[in-house]
Image (cartoon, rainbow, N blue to C red):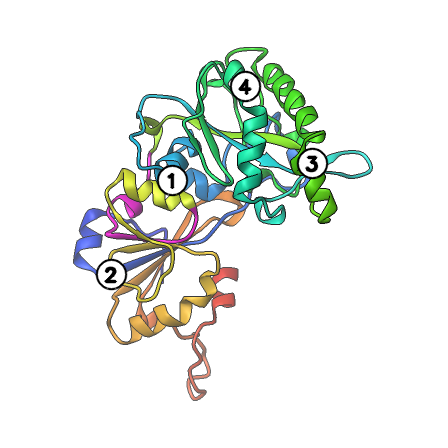
Amino acid sequence: MTVNSATSPAAQTKLRRFTLMLSGEDAFDSEEECAMVDRPVKGLPHECYLLGKLVPLAPVLLLGQTSQAVNPSEVIACLQPVHLHATRDHLILMGQNQIDLTQTESTELLKTALPYIEEDFQNPIQFQGQHYWFIPAGPFASLASYSIDQAHGRNIDWWMPRDTNEEGIAKRWRKLQNEIQMLWHIGSVNEAREQRGMPSINSLWISGVGKLSDVKAPLAVQQSNHLYGAHPLLAGLAKLYNISHSEELNTPGPGSFAWLDHPESIWPILSTALNNQALDEVLIIDFPKGKTRERLYQAKDLSKRSWAFWKKVEPLTWQEIISS
């Protein structure tokens, strides 16, 4: 096994490599660690890896969900209807997979909020999906924001949008957010959801502010011939770099890049492909303590090393790989 191995063009062409990326967590995760810095690091480690340090999530997500052209120099914002769960002394952002928002509900919520959104953003909505709405950022272009993937399950005080080079923008966003919260509170969508025992849609979240020209994807993505994974970011990157994309992975072909919800399920298939020489190597990219780590595995690396040479050789388990 080789640690921090290069993903150079030469390496990609000489060897039949499959790349598997794992999701990462913030380096600063506890209250004590957060107190050491004045604001959160923008982007989860894998978001930064895929998109570059500016983490322009919104235009890439938009590109993956629409057939219309996306202006590479236009700053786009992503808006998402969310539920903020009230605890004793703070609010926690719930993940999108916890609120079961329907397309009909999303459409009705946007219809109610649309005049306020378009007036403050000074632009029309570009695209409306079930979980994502996209709009040119206009006066909110300088806002520092954080994705729901990064902020969910946490106290939103720390993850609210912040000013960068222009003061008052975050305050302006909170004013709009509060207006929409009041509109939705008395709306028919939440009345119906309450009757079904569902969490209310009680706020609007902004994130991913950026432009397509700021995307700096790694060579491991740009030089792939196929991207695998259900996250909508991959669909956008595939379109941006003209790469084939599939949500599900059946056969791990050479030159492919995968980011999967359950990577442990694919490891036995990858191990078999290495042992059968269908692949020469597997590159695993993960993010211990928020830092990018690359490790190459070949067939010779799949067994546990032991000084007791007379014992039967045992294969490495997925748990042993990710915990090493």
Image mark count: 4
Task: Tell which tag, 1 or 3, sits nearer the viewer.
Answer: 1
Tell me the residue that label 3 is attached to.
155
Q: Nearer the viewer, mark 2 or mark 4?
A: 4
Badge 1 crowding class, 10 Å Cα cut-off, few under 14, some 14 to 19, many 20 or more, is some
- Asked if residue 228 is among those painted magenta in the image, a careful observer would answer yes
Q: Nearer the viewer, mark 1 or mark 4?
A: 4
Dots 2, 1 in contact, CB < 8 A: no
Left or right for 178, reference 16: right
In this rendered view, identify the residue nearer to me: 301 or 227.
227
Q: Mark 4 belongs to which amino acid?
A: Pro
Q: Nearer the viewer, mark 2 or mark 1?
A: 1
Residue 65 bears which disc, if any?
1
Question: How far from the left and from the top, in percent, is residue 180?
Answer: 63, 24
Dot 1 and dot 4 residues touching (CB under 8 Å) = no
Residue range of the region highlighted in magenta in the rendering = 216-231
